[in-house]
Amino acid sequence: MARAPWERVDVSDWSVRRTEAAGSSENLWLDEPGSDSKPDRRWMHKDITIPLNGAEQGEDWAEVVSTR
């Protein structure tokens, strides 16, 4: 079953393919587990920024909006 584009997924056990050099912060290209035969199942991971006030900055939903 396909996931909704805004669904958060725990990727803590996914393997890192490489580090993305472009951009203002370090991002990672991850391989989805069980996707060895599907090269299109690589995902870019960007950490969510949570400043001292505890309010998430919205990078996750902003990325979904910008890709739609």
Image (cartoon, rainbow, N blue to C red):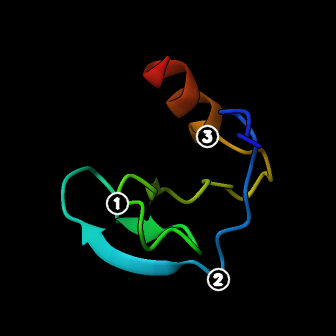
* Label at residue 13: 2
Amino acid type, residue under disc 3 in the picture? Asp
Rendered residue at 74%/49% (across/down): 8
The mark closer to the camera, 3 or 2, is 2
Q: Quadrant of residue 55?
A: top right
Give the side of residue 61 with respect to residue 56, left or right.
Answer: left
Q: Does dot 1 land on a helix, a strand or a loop? A: loop
Number of on-image labels = 3
Amino acid type, residue under disc 1 in the picture? Pro
What residue is shown with label 3?
60
Residue 63 percent coordinates (x, y): 51, 32
Residue 35 percent coordinates (x, y): 51, 68
* Label at residue 39: 1
Amino acid type, residue under disc 2 in the picture? Asp
Rendered residue at 29%/72% (across/down): 19
| 48 vs 33, nearest the viewer | 33
Q: CA distance from mark 3 to mark 2?
A: 19 Å
The correct choice, above or below, for 4 with respect to 19 in the image is above
